[in-house]
Image: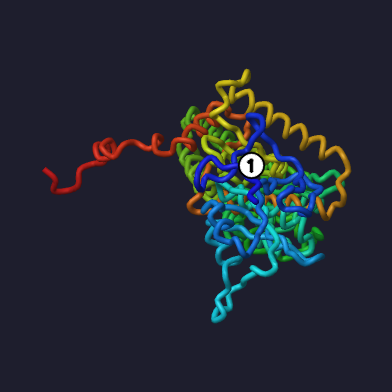
Amino acid sequence: MNTSKKTGEGEGPVLSGPLATRHSPLGTSAAVGTLPVYSVTVLELDCGQDFDPSRDEDFFAALPPRPAVCLIESRAENAEPFLIRTQDLRRRLQRLLGSPDPTSKRLNVRELARGIRYRLTGSALEQMFTYYQHAKHLFPQRYRKLTRLRPPAVLKISLRNAYPRCYVTRRIAIDETGVPTAGAYYGPFPSRKSALAFSVQALDLFKVRRCQIKIRRDPTFPGCIYSEMKMCLAPCFAGCTKEEYDAEVARLVQFLDTSGNSLRFTIEADRERASADLDFERAAQLHKRLEKLDDALRFRPELARRIEYLNAVILQRAAEEQSIGVFAVHGGRLAEPFFLRFTEIASQPRSAEHIFKDYLDGSAAAAQNGEKSPAPSAAASRDELSEHLALVSRWFYSNPRDGEIFFREKDWPYRKILRACSRLLNPKAAEPPASEKAKSEPPTQGAS
């Protein structure tokens, strides 16, 4: 018996409820019997069917050929369920639950399956997040292997060191409140190579050390090539005072915090003063330094910023028609998503902008309250932050990338968010007609 409601053949379930929905803990379905009741809030597997091998044709016909995350329950007691993600639910289950081929070595669980629970997904991010949360709950010992999550590369300025340096790492230290500690972290980057390339370019603009030695401030120490090239303040042989080095590190931190704007404003102001004083040679040098800054910032992805200030909202097409999935990111952590149904907005007293404000402000407040309360453990909080950053990074750096992302600067760009929703719901209308594209293209050589 199918427990999902259908609007038509292959359309999947109709989600009932209010206009903007958040997802409650999974419950036991009457059709599936003794499926587990999960104790965590996740993107629930809201559709289910019993599996009867003697009626497999009706079972497969009721499944939509759409992307989904599916949980196959076993008939045997105490047996682990089988969690899968697929781009075509019907075809994948026909392979797993169909009549087995004696000559094939392909996995078949037809005789073991009791029923399924599944969730249709409208985007890659929704599918990744759904699969990750259920895998983490069902298989806490091996969910990282199942999801293939690897902590992303970030830049760290180890402020606890007497003479800090900037380097690439995949480990983010977390205090008891879940906030990154022991330094300033910037990222995530698509790879360690990408993070290293940006750090090399950025450090060329400052005189912060790059060596890994212990600084002893020994005047007899020979130094290194960077000190010879005047690219390091050389604290190793007491080439500067502690205060001078701390001031240079503070400039580097401010540079990374402001995405390079702090250094840009300083150089531009100095260049204007040099031009006003008719010191054109110095103005030209400052202009070249500004070009060097622009070259360095080209290595910085838009997503890479200080982790605790990584606040964004990701918009995705939902599985339901005329609906948008909204995923907020606060301090690098994914908040509980909600789904906005534009077909029901006309009957609601609030506008879409007010709904977005309530969600984004509410999820931000919840994140702050979560930081104030003690975390279960520092290791668990660190793992969660790294895993959420890995999910966001995997989506952001994917090619092609579906959906849109907007970062919070001083406030949320609500108007841009609403226009993006319109583009996602009407992708064809957002593209200019072919005739307009042809008019806008320059004529080829030799055309009359």
Type of colouring: rainbow
Q: Is residue 320 left or right of residue 309?
A: left
Mark 1 secondary-structure assignment: helix
Q: Is residue 238 visible?
A: no
Mark 1: amino acid: Phe
- Depth check, front residue: 41 or 273: 41
Which residue corresponds to the image point at 52% horizontal and 61% vertical from the top-left?
A: 91
- Depth check, front residue: 215 or 137: 137
Which residue corresponds to the image point at 44% horizontal and 35% vertical from the top-left?
A: 426
Image quarter of residue 307: top right
Location of residue 139 in the rendering, given as x and y in whole percent from the top left corner:
76, 61
Q: Is residue 185 visible?
A: yes
Q: Is residue 63 left or right of residue 130?
A: left
Which residue corresponds to the image point at 67% horizontal and 64% vertical from the top-left?
A: 224
Residue sitting farthest toward the bottom: 103
Residue sitting farthest toward the left: 448
Location of residue 65 in the rendering, given as x and y in whole percent from the top left corner:
51, 53
- Depth check, front residue: 305 or 4: 4
> Which quarter of the rendering shows the C terminus?
top left
Residue sitting farthest toward the front: 54
Q: Which residue is mark 1?
A: 255
Location of residue 433 in the rendering, given as x and y in whole percent from the top left corner:
31, 37
The answer to whether 162 is drawn above or below residue 347 in the figure is: below
Residue sitting farthest toward the top: 349
Location of residue 170 in the rendering, given as x and y in whole percent from the top left corner:
70, 58
Q: Is residue 334 left or right of residue 438?
A: right
- Depth check, front residue: 125 or 205: 125
